[in-house]
Amino acid sequence: QVQLVESGGGSVQAGGSLRLSCTASGISAMRKYMAWFRQPPGKGLEGVASLVFTGTENPNYADSVKGRFTISRDNDKNSVILQMNGLKPDDTAMYYCAAVPGPLSPFHVLRPDKYRFWGQGTQVTVTS
């Protein structure tokens, strides 16, 4: 049984930072994609950042977070981290971790419909 458990959400003032963590269990595919998605209040799900858990490809980012967010992995802990700096009120959303065994087209790495496994979500609130 695959489980993705997120942690690290919270409330922060604009300009602040938060670090989200997602630990995966039950998914042992060597080439798996892990990503962060978010759902702002009243809006749909949108891709934030993704990476290949094994491999040398560069991570992918939504244009809205480039230069502010960094996705990384901890192979030993089977975890993916999202470091969020320079947070803005528009970043307020429920953030979800997702995973899928590869392969995955580079054109699809931020498409939520391509991911099979999802965490329960963690709330991020940025106040002005």
Image (tube, rainbow, N blue to C red):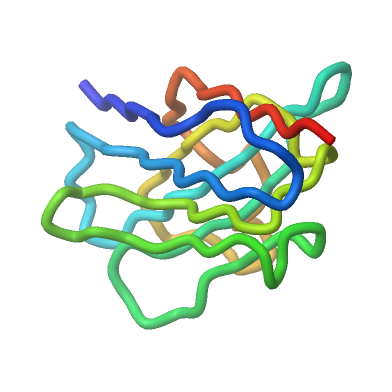
Where in the figure is residue 116, as x and y percent of width and height?
Answer: 47, 33
Q: Work out whether 109 lies above or below 57.
A: above
Given residues 60 and 112, the one toward you in this image is: 60
Picture quadrant of residue 125: top right
Q: Nearer the viewer, residue 2 or 47?
A: 47
21 on left or right of 9: left
118 horizontally vs 47: left or right: left
Percent from the top left, x then y, of residue 52? 40, 64
Could you say where residue 19 lies in the image, as x and y percent from the top left? 46, 46
Work out which quarter of the rendered image holds the C terminus and state it.
Answer: top right
Residue at x 48% of width, y 61% of height: 71
Q: On the image, which quarter does residue 26 sit in?
A: top left
Question: Which residue does the image show at 61% across and 27% down from the upper left?
Answer: 11
Above or below, 53 relative to 81: below
Closer to the camera in the image, 10 or 70: 10
Placement of 22 over or under 84, stated as above or below: above
Instruction: Classify the position of the N terminus by image quarter.
Output: top left
